[in-house]
Image (cartoon, coloured by chain):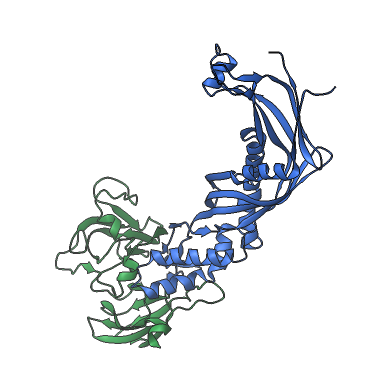
Chain colours: A green, B blue
């Protein structure tokens, strides 16, 4: 785990599966063996990389740091060979797209190198059945959670932190199912508690702060 | 054998001389050191005051209740805030055991902070200072080899007999760090951590406090403090290497009295009549000067040497 005091932790309040930041992750299984050419973009910069989905590879989770890929002269030590970075994962394994620092806003598109161009490439802005989107909310308040591709909605409330007799540890993550609806629709969270969205339908999950909670002092 | 010269100074006069010497003592020092999980530095400036002086018949001088006034006593302790990690939880569980995919975690923190504590104005005590007198012949290093005694006097570099208080025991009490030290440390750490987070993110600061838990417990754990904060600080500064301020003060006081500043000095040859009427001054050489005390006075004995 990296050590940081990145200001983005505090300034980036909302979360978007189609614009990944430090506290979000998309997990995708390619399933079909083959060579995939992928592009990570955030509007300002982009980077091409390859994902080899290989039965002979025992890797269950290929960690793909999008910030590192798009940083010039980044020390990408993930891959073998020369040229664009290459990640290898088992067909039943997962590509884990995450952002280790900076303002983020990344999405990833990937298509098989030998695939028919008529087949739609994978795009993290349109999550598929079997994908996972995971997010952490820090700022206390009430949030709307929307699948912008289906207009399904839910609501989450992050409680205000309080100092107790022992250091605070966030509880286990909550699991949210994304089908035609988002269930449960009413979510109570504690700060830093994870939200794991199990995606079963086409989805782009956007989480926005509706009403901030500035603590007991502000409520008084 | 009877001495040619006998000079006595009453206990009251001796006390006056001692007080003047005491008032001119100052110690200024700074230092820093690493202690593994933290580093510390200090700035001190101190002087002496008070004290009860007694002259004894066994040729010793004893000063009790001499006070050390810490004009400046500031301590800075630097340590890294440990990282508080978010994430790391499981996203895709392994159907058989454990976890296939975890949320890549991040740790917030790792910054160094240096809370400062100011104990200026504190008073410590030298419970006991025992000494005797030591007369030392002093040849002014600025005196040229070819100079006569008259040349040396005219050039203001005469030789001298110097009488020093020679401490044989200096016993400094441990630094009495007040019990409020824990509060001071807690507040200093709190302020510094709050400064790390911009004030508009009040919620983030509160989240950080929740993660840290009780701040004093956190500080005690990071610094490895066993016992009270005040005892720990007193120990850190006062009685353990590398700072060992008690030893430093004892040595500084001993050096000051024993070799740097005499309680009294006589010029040699001693001027008897000043120059005048076209005549050179009359001076007598002094030999074998000794200084002792008894319960009533300081006694200086000397002989007139060959001219």
Q: Quadrant of residue A184?
A: bottom left
Residue furthest front as drawn = B277
Q: Residue at x 29, y 50 (%)?
A: A74
Question: Residue A119: horizontal and vertical position, in percent?
Answer: 17, 68
Q: Which is more toward the observer, B26 or A166?
A: B26
- Against A60, residue A151 (above or below) is below
Q: Residue at x 47, y 60 (%)?
A: B81
Q: Which is more toward the observer, A111 or A54?
A: A111
- Against B166, residue B207 (above or below) is below
How many numbered markers are drawn? 0
Q: Can residue A61 be seen here?
A: yes
From the image, which quarter does the C terminus of chain A lie in?
bottom left
Q: Which is more toward the observer, A4 or B81?
A: B81
Question: Residue B178: horizontal and vertical position, in percent?
Answer: 62, 63
Q: Is residue B25 left or right of residue A141?
A: right
Q: Quadrant of residue B162?
A: top right
- Against B132, residue B217 (above or below) is below
From the image, which quarter does the N terminus of chain A lie in?
bottom left
Question: Residue B262: horizontal and vertical position, in percent?
Answer: 65, 34
Q: Which is more toward the observer, B268 or A108?
A: B268
Residue furthest top as drawn = B146
Question: Residue B134: horizontal and vertical position, in percent?
Answer: 72, 31
Q: Is residue A67 left or right of residue A121?
A: right
Q: Can residue A29 be seen here?
A: no
């Amino acid at each position: 785990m990296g050590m940081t005091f990145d200001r983005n932790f505090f300034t980036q309040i909302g979360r978007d599966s189609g614009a990944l930041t430090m506290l979000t992750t998309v997990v995708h299984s390619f399933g079909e063996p083959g060579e995939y050419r992928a592009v990570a973009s955030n509007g300002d910069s982009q980077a091409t990389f390859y994902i080899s989905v290989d039965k002979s590879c025992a890797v269950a989770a290929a960690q793909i740091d999008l910030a590192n890929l798009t940083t010039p002269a980044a020390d990408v030590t993930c891959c073998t060979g020369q040229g664009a970075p290459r990640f290898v994962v088992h067909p039943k394994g997962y590509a884990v797209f995450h952002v280790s620092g900076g303002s983020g806003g990344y999405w990833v598109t990937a298509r098989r190198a030998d695939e028919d161009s008529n087949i739609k490439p994978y795009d993290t802005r349109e999550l598929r059945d079997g994908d996972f989107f995971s997010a952490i909310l820090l700022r206390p308040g009430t949030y709307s959670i929307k699948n912008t591709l289906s207009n399904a909605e839910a609501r989450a409330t992050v409680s205000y932190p309080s100092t107790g007799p022992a250091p605070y540890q966030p509880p286990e993550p909550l699991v949210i199912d994304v089908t035609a609806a988002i269930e449960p629709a009413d979510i109570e969270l504690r700060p830093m508690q994870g939200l794991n969205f199990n995606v079963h339908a086409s989805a782009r999950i956007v989480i926005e702060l509706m009403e901030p909670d500035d603590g007991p002092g502000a409520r008084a | 054998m009877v001495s040619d010269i006998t000079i006595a100074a009453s206990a009251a006069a001796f006390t006056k001389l001692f007080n003047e010497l005491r008032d001119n003592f100052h110690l200024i020092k700074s230092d820093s050191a690493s202690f593994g999980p933290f580093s510390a530095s200090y700035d001190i400036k101190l002087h002496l005051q008070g004290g009860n002086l007694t002259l004894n018949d066994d040729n010793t001088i004893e000063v009790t209740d001499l006070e050390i006034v810490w004009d400046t006593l500031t301590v800075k302790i630097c340590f890294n805030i440990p990282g508080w990690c978010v994430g790391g939880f499981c996203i895709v569980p392994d159907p058989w055991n454990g976890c296939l995919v975890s949320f890549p975690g991040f740790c917030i923190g790792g910054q160094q902070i240096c809370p400062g504590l100011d104990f200026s104005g504190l008073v410590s005590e030298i419970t006991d200072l025992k000494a005797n007198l030591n007369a030392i012949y002093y040849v002014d290093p600025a005196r040229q080899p070819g100079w006569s005694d008259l040349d040396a006097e005219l050039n203001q570099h005469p030789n001298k007999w110097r009488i020093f208080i020679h401490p044989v025991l200096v016993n400094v009490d441990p630094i009495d760090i007040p019990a409020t030290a824990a509060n001071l440390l807690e507040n200093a750490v709190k302020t510094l951590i709050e400064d790390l987070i911009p004030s508009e993110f009040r919620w983030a600061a509160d989240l950080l406090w929740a993660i840290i838990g009780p701040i004093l417990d956190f500080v005690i754990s990071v610094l490895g403090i066993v016992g009270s904060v005040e005892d720990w600080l007193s120990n850190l500064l006062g009685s353990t290497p590398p700072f060992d301020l008690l030893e430093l003060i004892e040595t500084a006081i001993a050096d000051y009295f024993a070799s740097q500043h005499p309680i009294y000095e006589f010029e040699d040859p001693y001027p008897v009549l000043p120059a005048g009427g076209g005549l050179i001054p009359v001076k007598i050489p002094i030999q074998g000067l000794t200084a002792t005390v008894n319960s009533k006075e300081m006694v200086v004995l000397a002989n007139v040497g060959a001219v």
